[in-house]
Every structure is written in C-alpha cells, then in structure tokens.
Amino acid sequence: MNKNILSLLLGIIIVPAGCTMAPKYTRPAAPVPVEWPHGAAYQGGQSSPGVPVATEAPEVAWQEFFADPKLRQVIGIALTNNHDLRIAALNVERARAIYGIQRNELLPTLDAVGSGSKQRVPADLSNSGRRQTVERYDANLGVAAWEIDFFGRIRSLKDRALEEYLSTEQARRSAQILLVSSVASTYLVLAADRENLTLAETTHTTQQDAYSLIKRRHALGLVNDLDLNRAQTQVDAARGDVARYTQLVAQDENALTLLAGSLVPTELLPGGLSGVMPPGEIGAGVSSEVLLRRPDVLQAENLLRAANADIGAARAAFFPRISLTASSGTASTDLSGLFKSGSGAWSYAPQIVMPIFDARTWSAHKAAKVQREIAVTQYEKAVQSAFRDVADALATRGTVDQQVGAQQSLVNAVAETHRLSSSRYDKGIDSYLSVLDAQRSLYTAQQGLVSLRLAKLANNVRLYAVLGGGWQASTSAGDTAMNRSSNGLGNN
C-alpha cells in the first residue's frame, strides 16, 4: 500500500497541471503616434545631411554618454552609496523571495512528525468495561493538506508573483535612471551656479572699482550726487548677487552629497560650466516604439500581466479544490516497539471541495477584471507620459541652439554698448545713466547665457533619461521573456 501511495504522489507531481485559466495576454496598442512630433520647434534638432544619426539611449551606457571624468566618478559614488537605490534593490530581493514562496506552493510539503500520547480511559468509556491507560507513539513521514492544482489557481498566483517581482526589478532600473540623471543635472546646476558666482564676483569688483573712481571725482566736484548714488546701487546689487550665488552653490553641494550618499571629494566638484565636458548626443530612434523599452513602461506592463493572472486565479475559484493528506510510518503502544517488525502504519485522506454557492467568488472575479482594466489604463498612461517627456525634450533640443546663439549675439552687442557708453562717459559726452543701463543689461545678458548653456546640457541628460538610458542592462527584453517562459508563464 505504501508503494501505491508513493506512486500516486509521484504521478500527480509528474503529470502537468495543465493550462491556467487566465485569459490570453495581448499587449495593448500604444496610444501614441508611431512617429515623433514634427514642426518648427523640432527642426533644429534634426540631423544635417552627411552627419551620422546619434545612437539610441538604451544602446549607450552612462559611462560612455557622460564624457566628463569627474562627473563619471561622482555618478559611480552615487550608484554605490545612494540610499534610495539601495532600498529599490532590497525591494527586488524581497519580491524575489515572495515569488519563491508562491512558486513553491505548487510542491507538496514533506514533514517528519514524531508524536506520543498517554491517556486514562474511565471504565464506562472503555470497551473492556474496566478503566485503563492507553499509550500511543507514532513516527511518520507525510504530506499535509497539499492542494493539487488541477485548475491552475496556484499557478496563476505564481504567475502574478513573478510579474510583481519583474515589476520591482523595472522599478529599480527606473530608480537608477533617475539617480544618474539627477546626479548629472545637479552637477551641471552646481557648475552653472559656480560660474554665476564667478561672474557676480567679477561684476562686483568692476562695480566697486567704478564706484571708487566716481567717488574720487565726486570729491573733486566733477560728479554730482545722483551719479554717485547710481554707482552705489550697482555695487550693492552685485554684492547681493555674490551672497545669493554663494548660498546656491552651498545648497547645490549639499544636494549632490545627498544624491551621492557620501561627501563628494572637493577635487571632483566642477569649477564652472565652461570646464565641464558636455554629454553625448542621443537620437530618439526610428519610431516611438523605443518607449516600450523604458523601465517604467515595462513595469506598467508587468503589473498588467499580474492583473491578467489574477483573473485566472479568480476563475479557478469556481472549480473544485482537491487536496491530499497522506503519511507513512510506524505506530506502537510502546516506545521501545516503535520500529519493530509489524509496526508499520499509513494514512491516506484525499479531499475535494466543490463550491456550490459563495457570492464572494463572483465579486472577486469582477474585481479581478476591473483591476485588469485599471492596469490597462495605467499602462496606456505610462506610454503617453513617456511620449510627452521625449517630445518635450526634442522640442527643447530643436530650439535651444537658436536661443544660445541669439543670447550670445545679445551679450556681444551689449558688451560693445557698454564699452561705448563708458568711453562716452569718460569723455564727458554722455551721462552715467547710460553706463549704468549698459552695465545692468550686460550682467543680465551674461547670466541669461549661462542659464541657456545649462538648459542645453541638462536637456541632453533629460533626453538620454526619458529614452530609457542610464542603466547597463543585465537582463535584456529577450532574456526577460526567456525567464518568463522557463517559469511557466504563457498565454494559456
């Protein structure tokens, strides 16, 4: 009989449980145009004839995209020490463990159980009519309440756990992309603020020298009080800007330290925006289908697959559940005779539960279907948000060069105006008001040029990130599909 039980158990394990009752999964159509937007805002970002088209972001590792060696080192420090990324990695490990628990629900749990009991039976309950003491000792190896997954309920729950695990892995990749782009953007902002601080200090020194000269002229009666006060306002304004940019530089360094997870060495900090090697150029790809490789979009699709598997589990709840409890071992009324010949014992208790009426199963099935519709909507929203991110970055790339060129021309023109105004003032041809206006315009134009140069570099980083770059893929899309197949995930 023991052989029969073992053969039955082995047969149940070997015979496949069949297909799940989850509906066949079909990826929803992307609710965005196949091609990127066209128009005047995007023309400046198109490749010129004879110029090679830039590669797609997922094909370029961040070590190759960021050319500045100091910035690469800072990003490396952040990837090692950043606490948010560490939490994301630990979430992946936790999801992997939870998937392992759910996957192993398909297998029986084999336990070795030893027990002993001793009880006194009164005479009126004893078969012999006399009171007696009954002893029993057991040693068994058995399976307790193992659900045989004929209708795929546990298999569907296992599929859902797998997809949730894969979604956390995509969340980790999204966190890495965000970290890399945030470190690069903060680094560039720090460089721009340091350059603005240098500009403010230079302007303050120039204004202070001009004020000292006007003050001496005022003492000689060559300059009136109005011009002296106007010169003083420029000195005070520049001094205020020096204090403001000193504050911003300190805050930028604090932000960079937080992202890096440790204090960034001083020698790795940028001196100014002009000293930072610009990042590479990234193309948007042939079509918008490149967005389907973004980790956040893949994460939304994993959650959609998980919701699809939930429907299978909800459908299986309408069908019988078959469970098995079986054990084989020895039993004896005497502990010393537990393993003697003839003490063998076995038990076999299959159970089938057929649901007749349980309104909760219908509600659970409806809830699973609604949850899938929610997941579809979230997936479509993720694709649309990704398309908008890329379109905005392309619009900036198509116009920022023109803005930088126009601003540089403005700086040159205002600088010449300042030179001529100063010359006319020195010769007594013009008032100091013209010099004051020219100085203010030049300072503002120079600040604007720094801001636009920062916007151009930061937009390259943003375009790289929104196209899915910023992480070195350890698992490609094909590998993920292969893993899903090997773990029993299919369309059945």
Image (tube, grey):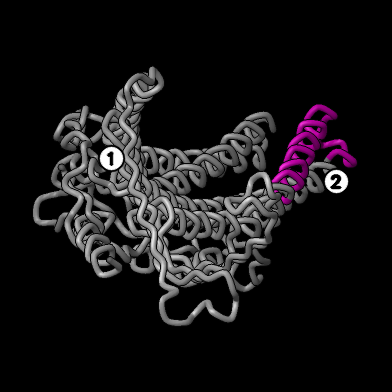
Q: Is residue 428 shown above or below 9?
A: above
- Tell me which amino acid carries mark 1: Arg
Q: Residue furthest right?
A: 219
Count of labels in the image: 2
Say whether residue 28 is magenta.
no
Q: Is residue 202 left or right of residue 405?
A: right
Query: Is most of the magenta stretch helix, strand or loop?
Result: helix
The CA span between labels 1 and 2 is 79 Å
- Pick whichever of labels 1 and 2 is earlier in the sequence: 2
- Snapshot quadrant of residue 211: top right
Residue 305's mark? 1
Q: Is residue 119 left or right of residue 57?
A: right
Question: Where does residue 212 sit, x and y in percent of width and height?
Answer: 82, 48
Residue 155's mark? none
Identified at 26% across, 48% down, the residue is: 293
Which stretch did the figure color magenta? 218-246
Please rate how many residues cluster around mark 2, counting C-alpha atoms within 10 Å: few if below 14, some from 14 to 19, many from 20.
Answer: few
Q: Is residue 214 shown above or below 192?
A: above
- Snapshot quadrant of residue 470: bottom left
- Nearer to the camera, 271 or 233: 271
Identified at 44% across, 48% down, the residue is: 458
Question: Where does residue 450 sit, x and y in percent of width and height?
Answer: 51, 47
Viewport quadrant of the C terminus: top left
Q: Secondary structure at mark 2?
A: helix
- Tell me which amino acid carries mark 2: Arg
- Say whether residue 394 is visible: no
Residue 216's mark? 2
Question: Where does residue 133 sit, x and y in percent of width and height?
Answer: 68, 61
Say whether residue 234 is magenta.
yes
